[in-house]
Image (tube, grey):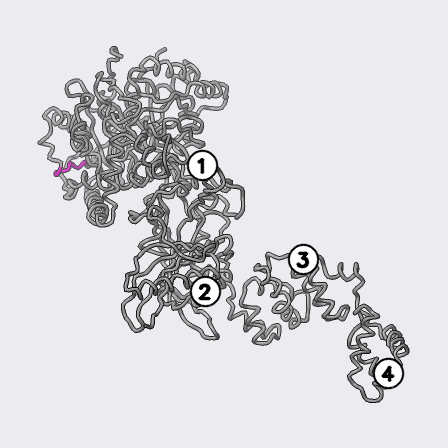
Amino acid sequence: MSWETVIGLETHVQLSTKTKLFSRASTAFGASPNTNVNLIDCGLPGVLPSVNKEAFYKAIRFGMAIDAQINQTSIFDRKNYFYADLPKGYQITQMDLPIVLGGSIEIFLNEAVKTINITRAHLEEDAGKSIHDEFDGFSAIDLNRAGTPLLEIVSEPEISSAKEAVAYMKAMHQLVTYLDVSDGNMAQGSLRCDANVSIRKKGDEKLGTRTEIKNINSFKFIEKAINFEIKRQIKVLEKGEKVIQETRLYDSSKDETRPMRSKEFANDYRYFPEPDLLPVIISDEEIQKIRSEFPELPKEKETRYQQEFKLSAYDAQIIAFSKSIADFFESAAKKTKNYSLLANWLIGEISAYLNKEQIEIHESKLTAENVAALINRIDDQTISGKIGKSIFEEMYSKGLTPDEIIKSQGLQQISDDGAIEEIVMTVINENSTQVAAYLSGKDKLFGFFVGQVMKLTGGKANPKSVNAILKDKLK
Amino acid sequence: MSVQFKSIVELRGMLDDKLISASELTEESLKLAKKYEELNCFVTMNEEFSSKKAATIDLETKVNAQLSGIPLAQKDLFCTEGLRTTCSSKILANFIPPYTATAVEKLENAGSITIGKTNMDEFAMGSSNETSFFGNVHNPWKKGYVPGGSSGGSAAAVAAGIVPAATGTDTGGSIRQPAAHCGITGLKPTYGRVSRWGMIAFASSLDQAGPLARTAEDCAILLNTMSGYDSKDTTSLNADVPDFLENINQPIDGLKIGIIKEFNLGELDTEVQARFEESKKVLEKLGARFVEVSLPNISASVPTYYSIAPAECSSNLSRFDGVRFGHRAENTDDLNDLYIKSRSEGFGDEVKRRILIGTYALSAGYYDAYYKKAQQVRRLIKNDFDHVFQSVDVLMTPTSPNTAFKFDSKGTQNPIELYLEDLFTISSNLAGLPAISIPHGQVNSLPVGLQLIGNFLREDQLLNASHIFQQNSDFHLAQPDLGNF
């Protein structure tokens, strides 16, 4: 039997505002437990929320980018449930009137483009964190994250494989980082998703029963969790059993999904309009301002890079794909003129190092200034490209400037033709047998002479000069 | 010199004439609280801090503001930094807030002195102060009788002359009904006039803070200070706050007063009716004109209120879970058990009843029939008011259909009976309108109150009419015989 997968994703994007959605406490990641918490965040008796408009602006910017309808009047609702890290016993969210309605996102998979429609995106506050393994016999609560603004983006069930789901999340990551609505840091939970997965017979109109996999926070886990779930559901259906509609958790250590205990999620959230907040109204002027300050998106960057920096279409596309690489490129391009060499380095060597560590460029020790300096030293032939690579390793691991490394290790390229000529003559004089062989037609030996010169100069001789002088002297 | 039963205006005069110092006044007030301890008006006293503050005020040389050195009592649901705030509930019996409610902060910044926190119905849920974890409050007019509620401790403290004024909150009549039962003046301002920041919520869309005092003029003084937009409460109104004293003496000649047909006043106790008719005559003599008006949906107020208020309360009280503050049950098995035991032990019966009703009203499958329907009816009631205020200035009703009653005589068997106490007061909360209760005589030696309901933000009209009434009558000057306490 042939099966078809239907996936819808609910993406939670943590908006990169300085303060929380309903309080003025900081949203900075990694602070000591319960230090980014004020009266409102811990839900003390008598406190009231007041809105942080910055979160609305970011949500609207996202809505504009996906060509959605923007609801300028925002109404909040309470979602009631008890949990130890939910201080008020309810979450403030948007139920009936989401700030963003409709729109679509393009995803790229195997050179093809597919459009995924967006149902809605709404603002809500995050909960705190329960820590169960640090204190013997106790659970601990960290409320630093409580009240952090989230944009929950709900896709239509139009995704048809785990790979497409990953492509969707990658497109989402690109978009939210480009728009500066989120730092997109998945390891810190700034971008995570719930996947609704169902299976149906190919050709069936009716959707199968879905399960929801909660809180997946890496591209790798999204693919694995969904693939596990697809296989599991197919197995259930092929046995002639029914898929149970339930919420499941992905356990990456066992690479499996399993049902959440029913206590871990309530069924009836008793939504009702939040009486502590008046409707938040975004004026036409505010909308105009958001539009006028709209950041440049990847496609626009691609075109500009080809015109302004004369990059190839391929290079421009790759550089522009990631916001952090594009930002890095643009600041380095202010300090060097050899744009194509800079692009080559970013796409090749630098990306390889970053991929190995699975980090973004701004999380590394590299600075745009240092990389531009490296490109300049190669460009002005102070060093060779090969030495450049060895220098880069130290720049990357220690954060040193290329000039520091060149100086301390004496790596400066020898471009002085007189000095090179001297060494070339030494090599010719000491290898008379090979010279004779070469002159009698063994052209391949040329490489041997180049190697000898490089050996004597510790690889520092300018290869172009070495070639030219050798050719001249071996005539 | 006795300060008992003195108004703020009188005390201000005594302070300005140096007949008494702020320290002496505070000491007197604290002494009276002690003397009438049996009334059980207070949950927590604030002796040390009040005396210190009074001493500081006595050292100040600048011209004193109206409230400077005036002792006040605060209902025990206003958070007060460093001073226990219980909501008269076991669940908050040991709660000491790290911050102060805006309304109280404004009063204290104006120089007033908080001498203590007053008893109330638990979480402001009740009309007799009998749901307090800290025991019943006696009505100063008659031992063993309720003071009304939920601001019963505040009303009794003012009626007994311990303090000239106190703060209260009014969700369905909780300022006006105890003011009526205790023979004092109480004002519920327009919803949003006074910030709710730091006021422990019962029903967010209905709760409103206001003053209880001996006179309308004193209420105006307190309201002048308490009012105003607060960025910490986005539901507070960004509207100009007039000086409520400015036009308080204006003649009320030509004031158009509406009598609500649907309230069927003819069915009330004849003595309550008689007081009402007498007051009408007083006001008519002062130039007011009466017209009968119709608010067709107002009879749905009580069921509407008892769908919305418990729904909001069920959610507002979720934070009392024993995790971060308040009562936590011991020997619990898991998180769920902690919730169940802490809340079962911490809340009283009436609070539990309302949480249950509210949870039900919001449940899937019932939301449309109860909560949503109630919000729709609420809109209709508000429309009715908007309509009548096109032709009248204020509306007039008795504050309560009855006088104060004996402890344990109402509502213990049938809560609905007690809910009907709020019949005349609830609709102004639903519509967000200001309303005042002023004393207008007695029935069987117990005070009864007259309610005036005003148009949106027209507290000035209510205070003006009440003040003129009080200038031409002496019901507000009556003092209870406290010999039994």
Mark 4 / mark 2, whichever is N-terminal:
2
Question: What is the magenta range?
Answer: B257-262
Q: Tell me if residue B220 is in the magenta stretch.
A: no
- Quadrant of the snapshot with the C terminus of chain A: bottom right
Mark 2 / mark 3, whichever is N-terminal:
2
Quarter location, residue B416: top left
Mark 4 / mark 1, whichever is N-terminal:
1
Task: Give residue A441's position: percent from left, percent from top.
Answer: 81, 89
- The subunit carrying tag 3 is A
Question: Could you tell me how far apart the alpha carbons at marks 2 and 1 are, in whole angstroms?
Answer: 39 Å
Question: Could you tell me how far apart the alpha carbons at marks 2 and 3 are, in whole angstroms?
Answer: 30 Å
Mark 2 / mark 1, whichever is N-terminal:
1
Question: Could you tell me how far apart the alpha carbons at marks 4 and 1 are, in whole angstroms?
Answer: 82 Å
In this rendering, which labeled residue sits more in front, label 4 or label 2? 4
Residue A137 image label: 1
- The subunit carrying tag 2 is A
Using the image as rendered, state which of residue B228 and residue B139 is in the foreground. Answer: B139
- The residue shown at (81%, 68%) is A458
Question: Could you tell me how far apart the alpha carbons at marks 3 and 4 are, in whole angstroms?
Answer: 43 Å
User: Same chain for marks 2 and 3?
Assistant: yes
Residue A36 image label: none
